[in-house]
Amino acid sequence: MFSCASDKISYTIREMTLKHIHLPPLTNAVMVILFVLFVGVRLINLVDVINFGADAGRDFLVTWNMYTHRQVTLIGPPSQYTINGREFFFGPAPYYFILPALIVGKWDPIAVSYFLIFLNGVIFIATLILISRYIKERSTLYLFAACFIFTPAFVAYSQSYWNPYFMLPTAMLLVAFLMISKYRTKKPVWLYIVIGFLWGLGMQFHYAFLLAILVSIVWLLNSKKLSFQTVLYLFIGFVLGFLPILLFEIRNHFYNLNTLMLVFSRTNQTQDSFMWHFYYLIPLEPFMVLVGSFLFGRFVKSNLMKLALITIYCLVCLYGVVTLPRQPLSYLILKQLTTEIIQDKPKDFNILDQLTLGNRAMAMRYMLTSQGNAPMDVTAYPASKILYVYSIKPIAELVVTPVWELQSFVPLNKVSVKKVDSVLLYKIEK
């Protein structure tokens, strides 16, 4: 008798406990906690894991020159895809986004990483606030938040500078405004102008954002929100967001458009040289996370199971973030190498990267230039009197089959070396 009563009491307590297990509502306090988590996760080992490579160095140099020469540019970074010596140019938005951070940070590239983390964090919270008005299932919102806070790929996208990475926060905002367009009864004019503007802005960062635009159009068609008037507003917004490239096209005889026509006219050559890259999917990832979160909230019924799965996902991802390997040329090592060269006070010198094999050493080139110690031009290696080479390999191995930048210094006459952490910095003189 007592056993049956005990079992019944235990069952009742268990049922009541499971029934009342729930995630807290997204109050202001919870939003602050999520923002702190977002920023804190990205600060873990930041100086070791940020990727400040050749593309970042190239774009930072352009931004530096824009500021020092008071120039305005209508085009941004070039694409990796070329055909007949022609390449596509993205928009200049990345330059203008990072310029204030570089100025405030006295041209230290780490300032851009802090700025990107903060910018992504603010957009993440804004997106969460906007979609939480229309999604009542808390587990959907928390899984959506957990994915963007802890997923190692999303963490990397917001720690380092690269123009495709800007597509992620832009697509996040796009998802939020599409949610508003779906559920809000009265649709103000500005809503569709903003959506169109985000389309144009995303295309400035990378033309892969076209995938997000296509998904958005399907979304609007499915919601029966497209009319002649809304299409007009979307077009106006797109023109505003894509304006620099449109002006560049008009002023330069439609360079990008003619390059695109060349691609279509030479399909065999295009198919042979085109490669699919992972970052093309970045603009689709907020849509995929939202759909996955919806499915999770709908099909996982137990509150305890929801909480357990979200917790496990966060812990597994956090382990992945904590154990990320250090970059071959980390920010701290790059800074130390730069300091060594500046203290040497060289003249008529150039630099060679044989560590990451980005021979022209654009990251260090930016560091030196922004500190008033610019090396000679990337075309002037033969005219240089001093060449600094950084690598983990012995110099004897590097000169067996020397790259073009090293060719004019062989045979070696005078070589000195310093060890910075695990990297060897060679100074070669003619």
Image (cartoon, grey):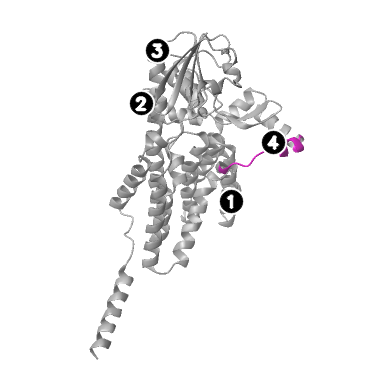
Badge 4 marks a residue whose secondary structure is helix
Q: Which residue is mark 3?
A: 344
* Residue farthest to the left, as pictured: 2
Q: Amino acid at mark 3?
A: Asp
Magenta residues? 266-278
Q: Residue drawn 33% across and 61% down?
A: 23
Which numbered dot is residue 297? none
Question: 204 or 234: nearer the eye?
Answer: 204
- Label 2–label 1 contact, CB within 8 A: no
Give yes or no for contact between labels 4 and 2 (Cβ–Cβ under 8 Å).
no
- The quadrant of the image that shows the N terminus is bottom left
- Per the rendering, the mark at residue 105 is 2
- What secondary structure is marked by label 1? loop
Which of the marked residues, 2 or 1, is nearer the chain's N terminus?
2
Question: Identity of the amino acid at label 1?
Answer: Leu
Q: Label 2's element?
A: loop
Looking at the rendered structure, which numbered label has been put on residue 226?
1
Q: Which mark is residue 273?
A: 4
Q: CA distance from mark 2 to mark 1?
A: 44 Å
**Disc 4 or 1, which lies upstream in sequence?**
1
Q: Residue at x 42, y 59 (%)?
A: 140
Mark 1 vs 3, N-terminal side: 1
Which circle, 1 or 3, is nearer the viewer? 3
Closer to the chain start, of discs 4 and 2, is 2
